[in-house]
C-alpha cells in the first residue's frame, strides 16, 4: 500500500535523489502554489514523486518530474501522482499543462500509452541522448575513425589557442553564419580547452567541436559545427573523429545530445557508432488541455 503527501521544503529532502540534478533546487523553493511537489510513501519510504510549477498569469502548469521507484511500478502510483498534479494545476487556475521528462529509449512505447490513457497528447521526442563507450578495444571496430582525415587547406587546433582576433570574428558570426544555440562560448567556464578543437580553412576559423569534462573518465561532446560551404565531405565528422582519437585514452566514455530534427547526425550515430552506444535516453514532452473541475 502507499499514500500521497504534498511536500514542503522541510519534508522534501528524502525525495531529492529522485529528481534530475538540474531540478533539485525546486525542492528548496516549494510554496504549495507556484512551486509544488507530491510524494508517494510506502512503509515510510519515498517511492514516487511528481513536481512542477504553476504559472497562473499564463493559466499554465509544468510537470518537470514524474518518477516511480524501481520495484513499485504498475501499482497505480504514477497515475495517482499525475492526477494529483493535474488537480494542483487546476486549483491554481491552470487550463493547460506540459510534462517534460528524460526516459530510457526502450520505455517510450509504454509511457506513450500511459499518457494517452490519461487523455494527454502523444509523447514527442525533442532530444536524443547517447552514452558511448570509446575504449581502445572498442575503437578497432571503427576502421573509418583512423581513415577519416582532413584534406589540404584544413587544420585543427586546440580551442585554448583561439586568438583574440579569431574570437571576435566568431562572436560576430553569431546569428549570421551560425545559430546562437551553436555558439562555442555557451557555458564557457566549463569548456575543456585542450580537447575541444577548432577547424580552420586557409587560416580562417570555420568550425568547432566543443567538449566538457563530465567525470574523470567521461566527456560531453557538446557542440559540433562547420560552416555550411564546408559541411560536405564529412568535415564535421572528421573533426569529431580527431577529438575521439586524442581523448579516448583519458576519457573512454562520452555523452552527446542530438536534437530530433538533426537527421544526418542521428543517422551517423546509429550507423557508425551503433556498437559503441551503451545507453540511449530521450527527452520527451507532452501536453494536456485541462477541464474545469
Image (cartoon, rainbow, N blue to C red):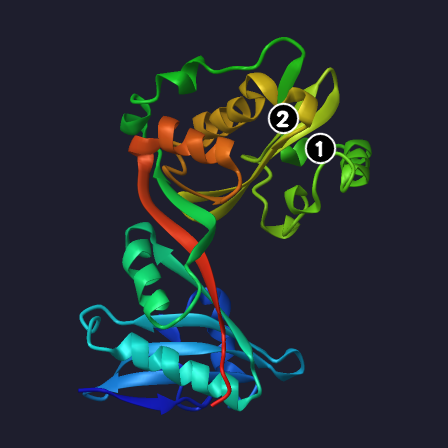
Q: Is residue 34 left or right of residue 165?
A: left
- Write the residue at 49% across / 79% down: 290
Q: Is residue 276 left or right of residue 203?
A: left
Q: Position of residue 234 (x, y in %)?
A: 54, 20
Q: Is residue 57 left or right of residue 83?
A: right
In the depicted structure, whether residue 103 falls above or below residue 169: below
Number of labelled discs? 2
Q: Are marks 2 and 1 in contact (CB under 8 Å)?
A: yes
Whether residue 80 is visible, yes or no, is yes
- Write the residue at 33% across / 55% down: 108
Q: Quadrant of residue 122?
A: bottom left
The numbered dot on residue 157 is 2
Q: Secondary structure at mark 1?
A: loop
Q: Secondary structure at mark 2?
A: strand
In the depicted structure, whether residue 120 falls above or below residue 149: below
- Write the residue at 65% across / 49% down: 188
The quadrant in which the N terminus is found is bottom left
- Write the residue at 56% across / 16% down: 233
Report the Cα–Cα distance between label 2 and label 1: 8 Å
The numbered dot on residue 64 is none
Out of 160 and 24, give the one closest to the viewer: 24
Structural crowding at the residue carrying mark 2, measured as other residues with C-alpha within 10 Å and reported as few (<14), some (14–19) or many (≥20): some
Q: Position of residue 68 (x, y in %)?
A: 29, 72
Q: Position of residue 62 (x, y in %)?
A: 52, 73
Q: Position of residue 16 (x, y in %)?
A: 39, 76
Whether residue 30 is visible, yes or no, is no
The numbered dot on residue 162 is 1
Q: Quadrant of residue 84?
A: bottom left
Amino acid at each position: 500500500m502507499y499514500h500521497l503527501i504534498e511536500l514542503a521544503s522541510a519534508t522534501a529532502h528524502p525525495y531529492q535523489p529522485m529528481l534530475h540534478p538540474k531540478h533539485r533546487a525546486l525542492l528548496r523553493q516549494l510554496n504549495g502554489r507556484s512551486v509544488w511537489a507530491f510524494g508517494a510513501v510506502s512503509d515510510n519510504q519515498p517511492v514516487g514523486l511528481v513536481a512542477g510549477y504553476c504559472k497562473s498569469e499564463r493559466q499554465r502548469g509544468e510537470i518537470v518530474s514524474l518518477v516511480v521507484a524501481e520495484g513499485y511500478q504498475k501499482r497505480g502510483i504514477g497515475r495517482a501522482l499525475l492526477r494529483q498534479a493535474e488537480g494542483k494545476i487546476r486549483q491554481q487556475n491552470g487550463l493547460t499543462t506540459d510534462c517534460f521528462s528524460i526516459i530510457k529509449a526502450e520505455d517510450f512505447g509504454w509511457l506513450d500509452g500511459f499518457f494517452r490513457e490519461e487523455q494527454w497528447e502523444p509523447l514527442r521526442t525533442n532530444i536524443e541522448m547517447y552514452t558511448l563507450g570509446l575504449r581502445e578495444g572498442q575503437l578497432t571496430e571503427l576502421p573509418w575513425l583512423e581513415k577519416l582525415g582532413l584534406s589540404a587547406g584544413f587544420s585543427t587546433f586546440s580551442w585554448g589557442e583561439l586568438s583574440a582576433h579569431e574570437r571576435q570574428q566568431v562572436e560576430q558570426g553569431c546569428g549570421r553564419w551560425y545559430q546562437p544555440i551553436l555558439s562555442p562560448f555557451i557555458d564557457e567556464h566549463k569548456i575543456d580547452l585542450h580537447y575541444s578543437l577548432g577547424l580552420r580553412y586557409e587560416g580562417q576559423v570555420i568550425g568547432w567541436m566543443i567538449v566538457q569534462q563530465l567525470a574523470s573518465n567521461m566527456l560531453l561532446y557538446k557542440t559540433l559545427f562547420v560552416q555550411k560551404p564546408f559541411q560536405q565531405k564529412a568535415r564535421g565528422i572528421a573533426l569529431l573523429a580527431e577529438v575521439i582519437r586524442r581523448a579516448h585514452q583519458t576519457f573512454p566514455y562520452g555523452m552527446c545530445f542530438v536534437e530530433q530534427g538533426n537527421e544526418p547526425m542521428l543517422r551517423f550515430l546509429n550507423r557508425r557508432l551503433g556498437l559503441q552506444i551503451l545507453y540511449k535516453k530521450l527527452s520527451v514532452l507532452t501536453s494536456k488541455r485541462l477541464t474545469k473541475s
